[in-house]
Amino acid sequence: MKKTCVVTGGAGFLGSHLCDRLLKEGFMVICIDNLLTGSTRNIEHLAGNENFTFIKQNVVDYLYISGEVRYIFHFASPASPIDYLEFPIPTLKVGALGTHKTLGLAKSKGATFLLASTSEVYGDPLVHPQPESYWGNVNPIGPRGVYDAAKRFAEAMTMAYHRCHNLDTKIARIFNTYGPRMRARDGRVVPAFISQALKGEPLTVFGDGAQTRSFCYVSDLIDGIFRLAMSKINDPVNIGNPREMTVIDFAREIVRLIGSRSRIVHKPLPVDDPKVRQPDITIAKRELGWEPRVQLEEGLRHTIDYFKTHLS
């Protein structure tokens, strides 16, 4: 019999790509999503697949799945600045109550549990690049705090279940990821710049653009997630691309690849916006044999092609 995986947030950007990978690996997949920020468009290609089931539900509510479950991937959460500023309370609830519900399900099924955490647990870091041992520099009461604190709580809850109930848990600290199925207006750098450049609109750079980001293509990210789920590691692991570049250089690269005449405009830097972001992936390389393989230009061309056909 095929083993069953549950993916919460499975209709989202990362969750839908994870569903694809798990199906390719021969698993049965149950996708749970309340579609607050996810979309059935991301999983419409799976309609009719006998190994795929979609359940529209908020994981903050009572969660029941019949039969055996081998893996639970908790990806449910608003994940962009626009989303968690618009939905601060749902963001906190899915990080706290949703994590509690999914961990309880994992405990009852004896399933391996993987939490999709984030580089945002490091806040505006004072250590660079960021290793898993760094505790972070987070403002818990700032506008971004709802996401940062929710994920930090989720990590604490996950480790508590591991220690108290001997549950096999994994924590993936996900850094900036891009690729097809991102929403054009979700507030993140990649979709914002691509959609603006395709429309010939000015590219909005916050601050002077000297802040840095590290961008990982989605297929690389999902490969790291899968390897982590199949590993024996229980401590947090950074999954991301260590290639660092400034936001303004990234904007210029988008303009070049698209051949756009868009100019770059500057706006004030948002509160608590991280000045640097670069993962130390030493543990992932050593323990998982993983590192990114898709070059930035290749990944951006795939992403641009997607937006050319999906931009409305």
Image (cartoon, helix red, strand yellow):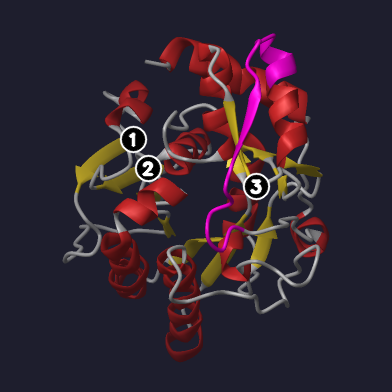
Which amino acid type is shown beneath numbered disc 1?
A: Asn
Marks 1 and 2 sit apart, C-alpha to C-alpha, by: 5 Å
Q: Are marks 1 and 2 in contact (CB under 8 Å)?
A: yes
Q: Earlier in the sequence, mark 1 or mark 2?
A: 2
Check disc 2 and give the amino acid type: Met
Q: Which residue is mark 2?
A: 28
Residue picked out by circle 1: 51
Are the two marked residues, 3 and 2, in contact with CB atoms closer than 8 angstroms?
no
Mark toward the start of the polypeptide (3 vs 2): 2
Looking at the image, which residue is at 37% across and 67% down?
95
Which residue in the structure is indicated by mark 3? Answer: 207
Q: Nearer the viewer, residue 282 or 112?
A: 282
Which element is circle 1 on? loop
In the drawing, does residue 43 fall left or right of residue 286? left
167, 175: nearer the viewer: 175
Element marked by disc 2: strand
Nearest the eye: 263 or 178: 263
**Left or right relative to 133: residue 282:** right
Asked if residue 14 is positioned above or below residue 111 in the image, the reply reads above
Q: Which residues are magenta?
A: 255-273
